[in-house]
Amino acid sequence: MRIAIASDHAAFNLKAELREYLIGLGHEVADLGTDSPERVDYPDFGYKLASVVADGTAEFGVALCGSGTGISMAVNRNPACRCARVTDPYSAALSREHNDANVIAMGERLIGIDMAKACLDAFLSTQFAGGRHVARVEKLTHPKI
C-alpha cells in the first residue's frame, strides 16, 4: 500500500517509529514531515496529508499530533478525507468498516507505540463493509447543509 504519514512536533517521535514499522511491513511510505521536534503548526501538516490522500497519491494517511484531535480536524477539512481519531484497535477497525476512513489519527501524548501499532494494523487490515454504510459515507463526502 501507499501510505502518507505526517505529524507536528508533538508527535515527531511516534511518526518516526510508525514510519519504520510501516516500511518493515512492506508498505511504500511518504513522510510529509515535520522533520524535527521544533514547534510547527499541525494544520499545515494535516492539510498536506489530506491533499495527498485526496488526489490519490496515497491510499491511506496517518495523521499524528499531541492528542490526535487537532490534526484530524485539519485533515477533515478536505471533503475527500475521512479521518478518524482512534485510541484502540476496535475503534480503528470500525472507522474503516463503517465509515470507510482513509486517514487514521492518533496522539503521541495519549497512546503508546504498541497500541499505536495495533491500531494501525486493525485500520489497514479492515475493509469497508459497504451496504447500509454507503449512503452515510456519501453524505460525509457531499454534505447537503
Image (cartoon, grey):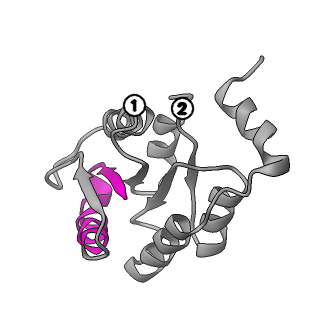
- Give residue 110's position: percent from left, percent from top: 48, 68
Amino acid at dot 2:
Ala
Q: Earlier in the sequence, mark 2 or mark 1?
A: 1
Up/down of 143 relative to 92, above or below:
above
From the image, tell me which residue sits under label 1. 55
User: 48 or 70: nearer the eye?
Assistant: 48
Q: Find out whether residue 7 is within the magenta segment.
A: yes
Q: CA distance from mark 2 to mark 1?
A: 9 Å
Q: Tell me the residue at 44%/73% (across/down).
A: 116
Residues marked 2 and 1 touching at CB (< 8 Å): no
Q: Tell me the residue at 38%/78% (across/down).
A: 113
Which residue lies most toward the right here? 132
Picture disc at residue 97: none
Q: Secondary structure at mark 2?
A: loop
Res 85 → quadrant: bottom right
Q: How many marks?
A: 2
- Left or right: 73 with respect to 98? left
From the image, tell me which residue sits under label 2. 80
> Which image quarter holds the N terminus?
bottom left
